[in-house]
Image (cartoon, grey):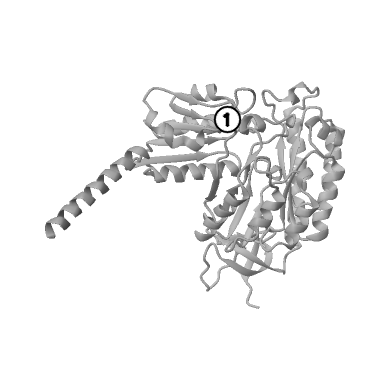
């Protein structure tokens, strides 16, 4: 009997060892390898980069510490403007110098739109398009010194394959998690390259997204930001709707807060607004791209609404959620935007009860229809218009913050990068906590009494409410 047990143990050990080495081969496990990451652009990019990092960690990589030289470097790029392209190139050159001998892998929108330009940068080993980056691990074995390989499939046209949706639910460097629900855009605004860089609109299923939110909750997530390129267009590939999605997510136990990253005005329905107003978990916080308050410029931009519809949406939100935070995207200096058009935009925004403006200068992008529009705006004039709108934004944000002084609010605390513990109210007011004898822990919800602005005017101060 003892000989049988001894033989059984040897066979079992052999099978475990064989299984381990088979897994090492099949799954491409990289032992004691270091990876570094650099991400530019939108929250969606950061969410996807985090998922890539998690995939590499599962393959055996660990994140390189400060001062260490990585074996591979993953650069996730943006291409929303020429400035973004330039920042991407600068980052790649810098990372090649900082990590001599590392394989530098570049993905993201810049890689998709200009793969040859990226591949020509000395030190780049691999260029992956949007459909390929989710399979990054499969390309690692083919990395070779002094050879750059490019895998970028077309996203539109006859040669385009089926669009790939890369699931992503990841935690940022603070407290919030990001749940990617949609990718791509079918709108083709005249100034924008995103449809070319991201492909057609596609999405995950509601059931899969609910599962991801449940998994995040099991890992301690309290707040999730719903991200995508055009999330109001959710459902193109599954026959569902964004309204269906937020109703389902609202029922996930353990999640206290959701924030909707951005919704096009024409897709922000009254039903969605009313649902957020009465939801258990969806916060009174909206981000709505306007781009211009001039109907003529909106027509040049090929936007799908006019200023009257935008005003209607803002007024509807404020009617049912008076304290809602409303952020607005605006582009200045679009081709064809005259002084009169800009003045219309300024007056329109001045009249709206919104909280903050995200101001961008128009950037000429190759292949866009806007290049055919007459009336280019000088850089100095773009800067002047931007400064005027930023001053207006500061005034609106100041008024919104100071209107809440003396009130109580629930704040989700975040681990600070430096300085005092801080967090955000449900309507996205940043609050810096005053010193207290009670230990404060990040990722906890606390009831706070709001006080005056901090020294630099970026947050209200808060104290634990004892009532």
Residue 144 placement (x, y as % from top left): 37, 26
Percent x, y of residue 152: 53, 27
Q: Is residue 263 left or right of 135 when viewed as pictured?
A: right
Residue 310 in sight = yes
Quarter of the rendering containing residue 232: top right
> Could you say which is closer to the camera, residue 34 or residue 165?
165
Residue topped by disc 1: 110
- Determine whether, in the image, residue 74 is placed left or right of residue 359: left
What SS does tag 1 mark? helix
For this rendering, which residue is in front, 20 or 410? Answer: 20
Asked whether 237 or 309 is in front, the reply is 237
Q: Nearer the viewer, residue 452 or 412?
A: 412
**From the image, which quarter does the N terminus lie in?**
bottom left
Image quadrant where residue 297 sits: top right
Q: Position of residue 317 (x, y in %)?
A: 79, 55
- At a point 83% along the width and 59% down the height, the residue shown is 319
User: In the picture provided, is 312 more to the left or to the right than 125?
Assistant: right
Residue 66 in view (yes/no): no
Q: Position of residue 58 (x, y in %)?
A: 40, 46
- Residue with the most extreme bottom position: 467
Q: Could you classify mark 1 by the number of other residues whose Cα lies within 10 Å: few (under 14), some (14-19), or many (20 or more)?
A: many
- Residue at image point 49% right, 23% down: 119
């Amino acid at each position: 009997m003892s000989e049988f047990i001894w033989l059984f143990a040897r066979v079992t050990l052999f099978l475990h060892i064989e299984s381990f080495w088979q897994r090492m081969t099949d799954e491409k496990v990289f032992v004691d390898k270091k990876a570094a990451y650099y991400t530019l652009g939108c929250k969606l990019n950061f969410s996807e980069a985090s998922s890539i990092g998690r995939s590499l960690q599962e393959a055996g990589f660990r994140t390189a510490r400060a001062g260490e030289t990585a074996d591979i470097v993953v650069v996730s790029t943006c291409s929303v403007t020429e400035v973004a392209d330039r920042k991407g190139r600068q980052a790649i050159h810098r990372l090649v110098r900082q990590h001599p001998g590392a394989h530098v892998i570049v993905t993201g929108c810049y890689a998709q739109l200009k793969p040859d330009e990226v591949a020509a940068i000395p030190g780049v080993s691999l260029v992956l398009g949007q459909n390929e980056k989710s399979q990054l691990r499969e390309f690692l074995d083919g990395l070779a010194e002094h050879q750059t390989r490019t895998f970028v499939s077309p996203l539109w046209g006859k040669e385009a394959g089926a669009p790939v949706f890369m699931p992503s639910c990841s935690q940022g460097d603070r407290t919030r998690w990001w749940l990617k629900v949609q990718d791509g855009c079918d709108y083709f605004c005249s100034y924008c390259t995103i449809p070319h860089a991201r492909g057609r609109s596609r999405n995950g299923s509601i059931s899969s997204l609910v599962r991801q939110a449940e998994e995040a909750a099991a890992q301690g997530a309290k707040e999730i930001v719903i991200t995508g390129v055009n999330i109001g267009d959710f459902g193109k590939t599954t026959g569902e709707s964004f309204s269906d999605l937020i109703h389902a997510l609202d029922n996930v136990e353990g999640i206290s807060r959701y924030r909707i990253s951005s919704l096009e005005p024409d897709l922000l329905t009254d039903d969605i607004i009313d649902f957020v107003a009465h939801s258990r978990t969806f916060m009174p916080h909206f981000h709505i791209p306007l781009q211009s308050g001039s109907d003529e410029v909106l027509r040049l931009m090929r936007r799908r609404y006019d200023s009257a519809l935008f005003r209607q949406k803002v007024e509807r939100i404020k009617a049912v959620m008076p304290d809602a935070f409303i952020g607005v995207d605006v582009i200045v200096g679009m081709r064809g935007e005259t002084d009169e058009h800009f003045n219309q935009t300024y007056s329109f925004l001045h009249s709206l009860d919104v909280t903050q403006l995200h101001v961008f200068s128009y950037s000429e992008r190759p292949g866009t229809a806007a290049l055919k529009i007459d009336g280019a705006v000088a850089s100095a004039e773009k800067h002047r218009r931007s400064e005027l709108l930023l001053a207006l934004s500061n005034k609106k944000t100041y008024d919104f913050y100071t209107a809440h002084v003396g009130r109580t609010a629930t704040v989700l605390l975040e681990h600070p990068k430096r300085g005092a513990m801080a967090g955000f109210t449900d309507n996205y007011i940043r609050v810096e906590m005053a010193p207290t004898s009670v230990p404060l822990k990040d990722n906890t919800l606390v009831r706070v009494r709001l006080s005056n602005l901090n020294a630099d005017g970026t947050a209200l101060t808060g104290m634990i409410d004892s009532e």
